Image (cartoon, rainbow, N blue to C red):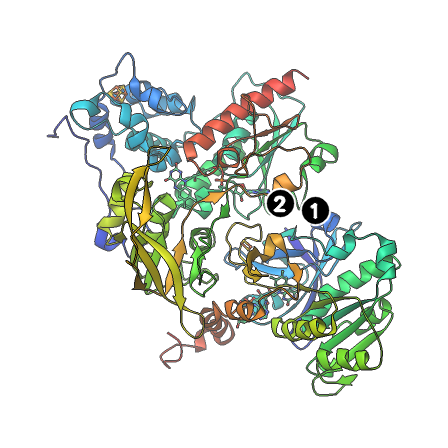
Amino acid sequence: MFEIVTKKCLGPKVFLMEIKAPMIAKKAMPGQFLIVRADKDGERIPLTVCDFDRDTGIITIVYQTVGAETERMSRMNEGECFADVVGPLGNPSDLVDLPIEELKAKKILFIAGGVGTAPVYNQLKWLHDNGVEVDCIQGARTKDLLIFEDEMKAVTKNLYFATDDGSYGIHGNVCVALQKLWDEGVRYDHCVVIGPVIMMKFACQLTKQLGIPTVVSMNTIMVDGTGMCGACRLLVGGEVKFACVDGPEFDGHAVDFDQALQRSRLYKTQEGELMLRLTEGDTHSGGCGMCS
Amino acid sequence: MDFDVMKKVPVSEQDPQIRATNFDEVCLGYTKEEAVLEASRCLNCKNARCMQGCPVSINIPGFIAKLKDGDVEGAYNVISLSSSLPAVCGRVCPQETQCEAQCIRGIKGEAVSIGRLERFVADSAKEMGIKPQLPADMVKKDKKVAVIGAGPSGLTCAGDLAKMGYDVTIFEALHKAGGVLVYGIPEFRLPKEKVVAKEVENIKELGVKIVTDAVIGRSLTIDDLFESEGFSAVFIGSGAGLPRFMNIPGEQALGVFSANEYLTRSNLMGAFSPDSRTPIMRAKKAVIVGGGNVAMDAARTAKRLGAEVHVVYRRSEAELPARAEEVHHAKEEGIIFDLLTNPVEIVSDENGWVKGCTCIRMELGEPDASGRRSPVPVEGSEFTIDCDAVIMSLGTSPNPLIKKTTAGLEVNRKGGIVVNESEMTSRAGVFAGGDAVTGAATVILAMGAGKAAAKGIDEYLSAQ
Ligand SMILES: Cc1cc2nc3c(=O)[nH]c(=O)nc-3n(C[C@H](O)[C@H](O)[C@H](O)COP(=O)(O)OP(=O)(O)OC[C@H]3O[C@@H](n4cnc5c(N)ncnc54)[C@H](O)[C@@H]3O)c2cc1C
Ligand SMILES: Cc1cc2nc3c(=O)[nH]c(=O)nc-3n(C[C@H](O)[C@H](O)[C@H](O)COP(=O)(O)OP(=O)(O)OC[C@H]3O[C@@H](n4cnc5c(N)ncnc54)[C@H](O)[C@@H]3O)c2cc1C
Ligand code: SF4
Ligand code: FES
């Protein structure tokens, strides 16, 4: 069983868990993901590997409670076990395959939005451990939602913050921040953007204008994570790809984000009902006409 | 009981109207009296043609003879010599094209109902607590074998190797063992707890270890299995799980699913039941594209989840690749067949949801090289079926993951792993069988390949 050894609340609705999963910890690479299932009736939920320790056999996940399943996970405690954790799935980040010298010669920028910070952290840490120094823009709606600040500082050369409400760092979203740096003469020749689809969409529009090759990590709906169901399919350069086996990283300038956004709404109503059932329990007796 | 010896003893089934609203098993199986009566129809032929029709050559007249005498345990032991999944095969094998197609009784009347008898024997043996046993004279061998995939081929190969004394571990990517038997074939045809889970338990009781949540090629590679995990041989039974889409406009719309996704949600994740937290679309009107067993399963599942269901298939009824029984059951349940029809586009509304499936009429042209008459579109015959879901059941091919992560593993043009007569691949000590080799086929062929591979592995390891 996959025991939760540490649980931390990183901010409103954001949780970190360290889980015992030695087989996965041995193999995981930055950019890969897991599928977890809380209990025997649970849904299979994809989450990025945010950290791994090959010696202790421990992996780290960071998630935001957006629906019923993540909400339920957030109610689990240290010492309890996940029914299933499978991985590492998907391809490791392209960066880890490049020769270190080549990486060092590149000017790389990471853009992290919301809980996308956690997967970015794993890549930054790997680069840092290999002597590659890179910059990062970390964005959030407001200061309280910024996670991992100290950890991120430790593994980046320049870490910039961007908050929508201006409560911390640059006032504005990550695109405003990148444009500002660019206008100040800062240049990059490779960019990795991980966060909400809508953020990746706009960040990619900007990096395309600026001519920076950009990689994104797509968090589509998934079931098996092994290429068996096609739930995770998306259009990249007009071709159908499966995020779980062809990705999760793709060329951000080729991804059809509008369609990806649309597909992420597939089970919205049903998931909403589940969430209501979970949060309101027996007090939600139905009959209001709002849910079928 | 008074009966017509030329015909099969009828079997009870759930009423079509009622069963179309539940997921309980459709066919209720023979009672002992019915089974013994049906067994009495067998002529116990000297040159039993049925056995030639059986891909694993079960001694059919042999087990039927035992059953005639009311000896269920004896009958079970006869079947067990050749098959390790009789409760499954009795339910899902295409007997009408295999054993029963050859049965002498079938010339003048109806063939002996071999499948139902096999099922009866296997189910009764289970109720009586009869299980496969390790041979009394088995000598434990000091060698470990890894089996990839817990589908019919993997389970069979593992069970046979355990009986030969090997230390066997199955690595399964999903959280449950069974392969297509748990994720693909629905509960109403093959009960998961009553049948599949029991078969898996039996294999475990032979000493086989099953590690779920282990994706070979990711969690561990085949090289790891040899180098760091101490295995001396590997069997690949990873199936053919990669779904095909049509590549027609609109296929990305909300409400278009592969049959694999739809069936996995319902079967593996139990989404048909209110206890499961995995969502599934409950369509109002669903179009199922394809005509095989997978299409029938998707259609009948959609029906049970409340949809009006249309099966759209480009050839005619005679060419439907699904088992006759499945087509018959589907029709009884009210599924509509739009034959000689092929989708050309999926139409969606302004929010991206499917609202229709535009199809074109087809007619059968000249027979092609394979002898099948190939369908050709009738120009200008396009029409649209209003619907809110389209489920693509166009067949599947082997998943490329293992090939991609295993140097020197040869595959053919269709992605099937290439094996020799003892099921060994181009890599020494690595064997393969089932759908991973043949592409999507049948349970019994996968089981047969698992058996052959166990033999091949034993010979290979014994020679070392
Ligand atoms: C490869 C991959 C890696 C991921 N890594 C992480 C991670 O490290 N941390 C993390 O918190 N999440 C991650 N996700 C997203 C995570 O899987 C979903 O948030 C989770 O499945 C939601 O489950 P739920 O039942 O709680 O919510 P649901 O009830 O399924 O969804 C609730 C609401 O959230 C929306 N939603 C669903 N999925 C997403 C999504 N991917 N992004 C934004 N909104 C969504 C739904 O439309 C719905 O309205 C990843 C996804 C993928 C595919
Ligand atoms: C919906 C449906 C209905 C069918 N109906 C019938 C029928 O009525 N009669 C009939 O005879 N046949 C039927 N078939 C076909 C039959 O089920 C298959 O031919 C048979 O299951 C093949 O067995 P297998 O052991 O080769 O593979 P599978 O049953 O596909 O099992 C392969 C297993 O390997 C696992 N796996 C894959 N890759 C990896 C990996 N990298 N690492 C670890 N594990 C892995 C998979 O998760 C799976 O559990 C049907 C198939 C489907 C999809
Ligand atoms: S061919 Fe038919 S009648 Fe003859 S042994 Fe087989 S099942 Fe019995
Ligand atoms: S999640 Fe099923 S194919 Fe990608």
Circles 2 and 1: CB atoms closer than 8 Å: yes
Of the pair B86 and B102, the residue shown nearer to us = B102
Q: Quadrant of the C terminus of chain B?
A: top right
Q: Is residue A117 visible?
A: yes
**In the displayed structure, would residue A140 be above or below residue B250?**
below
Instruction: Tell me, for residue B82, which label it has, or none.
Output: none
Q: Is residue B305 visible?
A: no
Residue B364, percent from left and from top: 28, 43
Label 1 crowd (10 A; few <14 / some 14-19 / many >=20): some
Which image quarter: residue A158? bottom right
Residue B38, percent from left and from top: 21, 27
Which residue is at 76% across, 61% downward?
Answer: A122
Of the pair B445 and B386, the residue shown nearer to us = B386
Q: Is mark 2 within 8 Å of ligand 2?
A: yes
Label 2 crowd (10 A; few <14 / some 14-19 / many >=20): many
| Residue B371 in the figure: left or right of residue B179 | left
Which residue is at 71% across, 72% downward?
Answer: A207
Mark 2 belongs to chain: B
Mark 1 belongs to chain: A
| Residue B363 in the figure: left or right of residue B165 | left
Query: Disc 1 residue type?
Result: Met
> Which residue has dot 2 on it?
B214
Residue A133, percent from left and from top: 87, 64
| Residue A217 in the figure: left or right of residue B44 | right
> Which residue has dot 1 on it?
A23
Which image quarter: residue B146? top right
